[in-house]
Amino acid sequence: MHTVVVGTSGVTASDVLAVARGDARVELSEEAVAALAAAREIVDALAAKPDPVYGVSTGFGALATRHIGPELRTQLQRNIVRSHAAGMGPRVEREVVRALMFLRLRTVCTGRTGVRPEVAQTMADLLNAGITPVVHEYGSLGCSGDLAPLSHCALTLMGEGEAEGPDGTVRPAAELLAEHGIRPVELREKEGLALLNGTDGMLGMLIMALADLEVLYKSADITAALSLEALLGTDKVLVPELHAIRPHPGQADSAANMLAVLKGSGLTGHHQDEAPRVQDAYSVRCAPQVAGAGRDTLAHARLVAERELASAVDNPVVLPDGRVESNGNFHGAPVAYVLDFLAIAAADLGSIAERRTDRLLDKNRSHGLPPFLADDAGVDSGLMIAQYTQAALVSEMKRLAVPASVDSIPSSAMQEDHVSMGWSAARKLRTAVAALTRVLAVELYAAARAVELREGLTPAPATRAVIDAARRAGIGGPGPDRFLAPDLAAAEAFVRDGRLVAAAETVTGPLR
C-alpha cells in the first residue's frame, strides 16, 4: 500500500488524494516528531506561568477574558471539543472526512500548533485503521476553522461520539478504537483548540474538486468536438493562430484538444453544403473561449490550494522564535473565493454544453438530423426528455453558482463578526461537480448518437474510438425508444471515471 510521510513542510495535493480516496497509509517523519516536541515544550512553559495566554490558559472566542487555572485546563480542552461537536444534517462523505483529518494532521506536524507528538500519532493511527468520524453537513462558517466538522473528528480521538469502521458500519468510537488498539487521547493545554482551528475541510474539498474538474474539462473538450462534428461544423475556428492573438492559456489548450479530437474527420467542413452558413452558433464556435476561461480559473484555484497546503493554520501559533501569537489566518476567504469561482465556471460550462445538446435535437438547427434524434419521430420521442434532465441539472448549477463567500452571519457574541462561509462554498461545489458530470454525459450520449446518424460521412478516428468505447461500456446507440435512465447512468460513469478521456487519448495522445 502507498505510504504518505508527513513532515514539517507540508504535503502535496496528490498526497491528500492518496489518503482521502486511496486509503494510503500515513506516517510521521522524524523531523515532524521533533518539531512537535519542541513546540510542545514552549506551550508547557507558557502554561506554567501565571500570565494568561489565549488557548493555553484562557477561555475561547468571546469567553477569552477568563483566566483558567491549571486544575481546569484538561476539562477546558475536553469541553471545547464536546461543545463544538454540534453539527447537524446528513453525514459528510468518507473521502471528505479523511481529507479533513489528514490536512489537520499536516498542520499539526508543522510544529506551529503546540500539539504533543502522541496526539499527532493517534490522528495517523485513526486514518490507518480506516476509522472515519461521523461529520455532519452543517456546523462550519468557514472562520475560526471548520469548527464543528473538526470537532467531530477530535471527539473520535477522545474515544467519544460515533465513527464509521473500515467495514462501513457506524458504531461508538470507543469500541472502534479499542478494537484497533488505539488509546483515546486526553487533551492538554491548547490541544483541543489546535485540533479545531483550520480550513482543512474546505481545502480538502477544493483539492478533490480540482482533480475532478481537470478530468471534466478535458471531457468537455471531447464532447464539444463531437457536437461540432455531428452538427457539420467547421474546425477552422480552432486553429492555433486564432488563439495566439488572444493569449489566454486555457483557451489555447481547449482549442488544441478539440482540434486533436477532430483530426481526420469527414464530418467537419460541410457548413457550406446545403443551407450554407458562414459561422457556427456561439455554443459551438466559442467552446474553447468558455472552457478555456474555466481552465484558467482552475489554474488560479490550484495556486491558492498550493499556498494553503504550505500554510500552518491555527490560532494562536507557535512562531519559530518561540513566541505564541494570536492571528487571523484561520479565515477561509482565500479558499472560499476560489470555491465559488469554480462553481461559476462549472455552471457556465454546463450551460454551453446544454445549448449544444439542444441544437442537436432541434431539426430546425441540427442541419439534417432527425427531430430529437428519434428513430421514428412521433412514434419515438428520442432524447427529448434526456435534454429536459440536462436542463434541470444546468438550472440547479446556476443556483449553486450564487457565491457563498459574499454572505456572513456574525457569531460568538460578535467576536467572530465576519466569516467566510467557505465550507458552504465547498459543499455546493461538490454538488455542482456531480451535476456537471451528468450534463456532459447527456451531451456525449446525444452527440455520439448524432454522429452515428450521419450516414455516408466518416467521423474522426478519435471520435470513433470514443463511440466504440462508449458502446462497450453499455451506452446504447441509435434505435427505437427504450428505457433511457440506464444508458444515461452508464454515460455518467463513463465520464466520471475518466474512460471518456482515456478513449480519446488512445488516438490523440495526452490531452492538455
Image: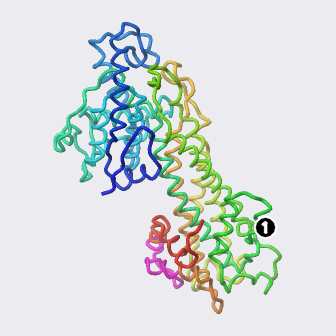
Residue that carries the numbered disc 1 in the rendered image: 242
- In front here: 39 or 97? 39
Task: Find the magenta span and give its range.
Answer: 467-488
Protein image colouring? rainbow
Mark 1 neighbour class, 10 Å CA radius: few under 14, some 14 to 19, many 20 or more: few
The vertical placement of 375 against 181, above or below, is below
Q: Which quarter of the figure is the C terminus placed in?
A: bottom right
Amino acid type of the residue that numbered disc 1 sits on in the rendered structure: Leu
Q: Where's residue 218, x and y in %?
A: 58, 65
* Relative to 39, residue 1 above or below: below
Position of 326 with respect to 402 (left or right) is left
Per the image, label 1 sits on a secondary structure element best described as: helix
Is residue 326 positioned above or below 141 on the image? above
Residue 279 x %, y %: 80, 73
Taking the view exactly as shown, the residue that stands out farthest to the top is 50
Q: Say if the magenta span includes residue 471.
A: yes
Q: Is residue 254 left or right of residue 72?
A: right
Number of callouts in the render? 1
Q: Is residue 245 magenta?
A: no
448 sits left or right of 150 in the view: right
Instruction: Name the spot of residue 70 as percent of width and height, x first.
Output: 29, 12
Quadrant of residue 461 within the rendered picture: bottom right
Residue at the limit of the structure toward the bottom, as seen here: 456
Q: Relative to 303, is 510 above or below? A: below
Residue 66 occupies quadrant: top left
- Residue closest to the eye, 492 or 463: 463
The quadrant holding residue 87 is top left
Q: Residue at x 56, y 79 (%)?
A: 507
Residue drawn at (27%, 39%) of the image:
162
Q: Residue at x 52, y 23 (%)?
A: 327
Question: Which quarter shows the N terminus?
Answer: bottom left
> Where is residue 239 shown, x and y percent of the image?
74, 72
